[in-house]
Amino acid sequence: MGGATLDDLFESHARDDGTPCFKTPAYVYDLDGISASAAEFIAGFGAVSHLVAYALKASTSGPIVRALSDVGCGATVVSGGELSVALASGIPAEKIVFNGVAKQDWEIDLAIGTGTRGILGLHVESVEEVERVRARARALGRRARVGIRVNPDIEADTHQKVATGHDEAKFGVPVEDLALAWEEISTAPELDLVGLSCHIGSQLTQTTEMLRSVELLLGMAREREVSGGRLEYLDFGGGFGIDYGGMREPPPPPAAFAAAIARRVADSAFADRLVVVEPGRCLVAPHGVLCASVVLAKRTRAAVVPRRWLVLDTGMNDLVRPAMYGAHHRVEPMRAAPPGPGEGLPFRVVGPVCESSDDFGEHRFTEPLPSRVLLRDAGAYGFTMASEYNGRPLPTEIFLSKGVVSAARRPRLVEGWVDEQIRM
Ligand code: LLP
């Protein structure tokens, strides 16, 4: 995405064709790109029976969830809110798994009470949670389909804030407690033990760690089934990394991850079971950009290091990843091509928020400076993590299909935001 058509969305002159005009900051998504990424990823599994359960935490916006549902994706959810969006977007209950360390009674009820037999699997993350799910199934007079999320104790090579499968993490049942959890679920008359799952972290850049977790999960499944019970599915989680630009070793394409997992499972005693994966980022991040206007360009001349700054109307309130994880997002002129290597001048690109971490890093620009820029690969964990910090209402979302606007979420206006604060 980029070029004249994107810029046109924000032109303020009157339009003959009635196309709506938007204001920055705005997330713009290419729904066709999202569908194509999902189709490619799905194809990577070949003949192995699979379910690509899109992790809604990456983006819960209806047009995106519907696009993924239309190409056959299921859903991975972590709250009753996400579960409701998945169901209302047309994802069948039997294609949904539910993770989370703190599921509340109403969320458990929604998961096991929906459809004829509830969702595909409610993943317990502790031995203690088994009793809670059992009590809810009893109260509803339903059977609950339960999976166990195992913490495989793998230190994934990613940012420490998104590594989830090591022994210090709050997630999953530790390997040592797996036999106990298995026993408790298998002997409960209200529960059906249907799956084993794990998720070792996000933005994984190699297949090696993912395959290690596949190996471990296969081993655990084999060992546990000897003691009785038969699993319907094995769920290897999400975490398929993408290239945010400038990476020394970009990750393999998601379909290569899929093919590697499929090959390993096809060669195992579990070749006839359903393989579930939970990708979020790789399906949507590359197909979303955050569009912003340049408020001003300034120079600090007297400082120890003289600097040029590009100050935008968007910041960590709209896209928190750089401030939170030191993440890199390419910042480019909206209309012109980005400067080639060595061209242009370095600018420190920052937002309006009163924190030094409100900083998108150094990027090069040529004169004349752009009036609007885009931040690339912002489709996942962008809008869903946005806040109204510093009195800045949530940004616009614009969804493109076949190059035209097919849906939009209008921002809450500043007036509405002010009203909400003072009415209480
Ligand atoms: N399944 C589970 C159990 C997860 O915890 C996650 C992500 C996923 C699947 C999807 O992972 P993905 O394929 O998107 O990597 N806010 C961070 C990412 C946090 C991911 C949390 N869990 C970021 O902006 O990088």
Image (cartoon, rainbow, N blue to C red):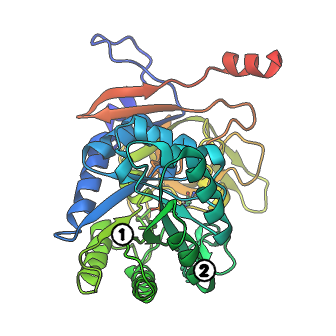
The answer to whether 72 appears left or right of 214 in the picture is left
Q: Where 32 sits versus 23, above or below?
A: below
Look at 73% across and 38% down and name the residue there: 389
The residue wearing badge 1 is 233
Determine whether the residue tagged by mark 2 lies in a helix, strand or loop.
helix
The residue wearing badge 2 is 180
Give the image quarter of residue 180. bottom right
Query: Mark 1–mark 2 contact, CB under 8 Å?
Result: no
In depth, the one of 356 and 144 nearer the eye is 144
Q: Which mark is residue 282?
A: none
Determine whether the residue tagged by mark 1 lies in a helix, strand or loop.
strand
Query: For the residue carrying disc 2, how many other residues have a C-alpha within 10 Å: few (<14), some (14-19), or many (20+)?
Result: few
Look at 60% across and 47% down and name the residue there: 139
Q: Which circle's residue, 1 or 2, is located before the other in the chain?
A: 2
Percent position of residue 261, x then y: 31, 77
Percent position of residue 78, x then y: 55, 53
In depth, the one of 332 and 83 nearer the eye is 83
Look at 71% across and 57% down and name the residue there: 306
In depth, the one of 194 and 377 nearer the eye is 194
Residue type marked 1: Tyr
